[in-house]
Image: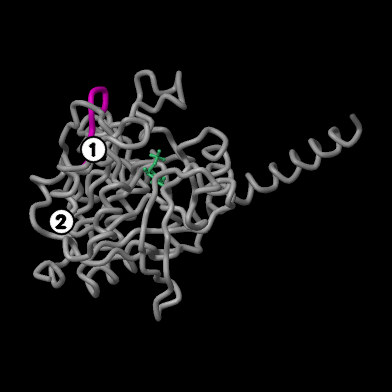
Amino acid sequence: MSNAQQAVTKAVIPAAGLGTRFLPATKATPKEMLPVVDKPAIQYVVEEAVAAGLSDVLMITGRNKRPLEDHFDRNYELESALVAKGDDDRLKKVQESSDLATMHYVRQGDPRGLGHAVLCAAPHVGDQPFAVLLGDDLIDPRDPLLAKMVEVQHRTGGSVIALMEVEPAQIHLYGCAAVEATEDEDVVHITGLVEKPEPSEAPSNYAIIGRYVLNPAVFDVLRETEPGRGGEIQLTDALQQLAADETVGGPVHGVVFKGRRYDTGDRGDYLKAIVRLASEREDLGPEFRAWLRGYVTEELHEGAGE
Ligand code: G1P
């Protein structure tokens, strides 16, 4: 396979969603800009791509997503105000996001699904393997996943998906993979994929979490992929095609992730992500944990007395 030896250098981040689950916060602010502690969720995702060596980042955006571009650009007014104050710490924070990666943007226009969003990246990506990172999933930087996926893609020349075992009752929220074991205990060979199956129809409890390293053959498949679940062009359906015929774009493998993942796509999980990450922060953690302990004890105490 000619693509097998090409290094992965480009990351694609779909960010065109309307964020309706977080209204009214997302009426005029993209959901990707909602802070997780003190950093917008999207910055964690870009940092993760960069940490895996992918510093060319293409964001698939849409209307009302201008703040994303501003966040990863310079802000001279703010910078000079902080320089004038001699506030180097905050200046560093402002400059961090603009120095992070080489950012590119393309607009999706019609939101026709994740598969369609990924297809919008075709002209930028060209004929080389590339990564896709979904913003609703945050992967703890202490548990690297993407670098392993890049390594597996390089070895196999095919496509690689991140998987995580979930409770069977949760599988209808995810794409689901039928798998067989390989010699590497963290890597499975994917024989089939289905988007958001009913638990009774799920081939396993391996859920797709939002990280992919894909052979560019996926673009041709996406061009032919009919709308699937929810009337949307599903990336999972295109990957199912690749898994079903390995002559098209090589084999499809899954890297099974056992580390810390935070879901910020749902309000309850978003709150949990903030509490967990804030508790672990060196600067905020000690005081926050002490407060949290007191708060929880008080709550439980009151709850018991009800
Ligand atoms: C998307 C994918 C799904 C995957 C999920 C991971 O769904 O279509 O296969 O399991 O991301 O977060 P969404 O959550 O955008 O509906």
| Residue 179 image offset from top left, x and y in percent | 42, 65
| Residue 285 image offset from top left, x and y in percent | 59, 50
Quarter location, residue 222: top left
Task: Choose between 74 and 169: the one closer to the eye.
Answer: 169
| Residue 124 image offset from top left, x and y in percent | 10, 47
Q: Is residue 38 visible?
A: yes
Residue visible at 17% across and 65% down in the picture:
247
Mark 1 — residue?
226
| Residue 11 image offset from top left, x and y in percent | 22, 52
Quarter location, residue 246: bottom left
In the picture as drawn, the residue positioned furthest to the right comes out as 305
Q: Reading the chain from its start, which is encountered first: label 1 or label 2?
A: 2
Quarter of the image for the N terminus: give it.
Answer: bottom left
> Where ligand 1 lies, by quadrant?
top left
Mark 2 — residue?
216
Q: Give the magenta range.
A: 59-65
Q: Residues within 10 Å of mark 1 (few under 14, many from 20)?
A: some
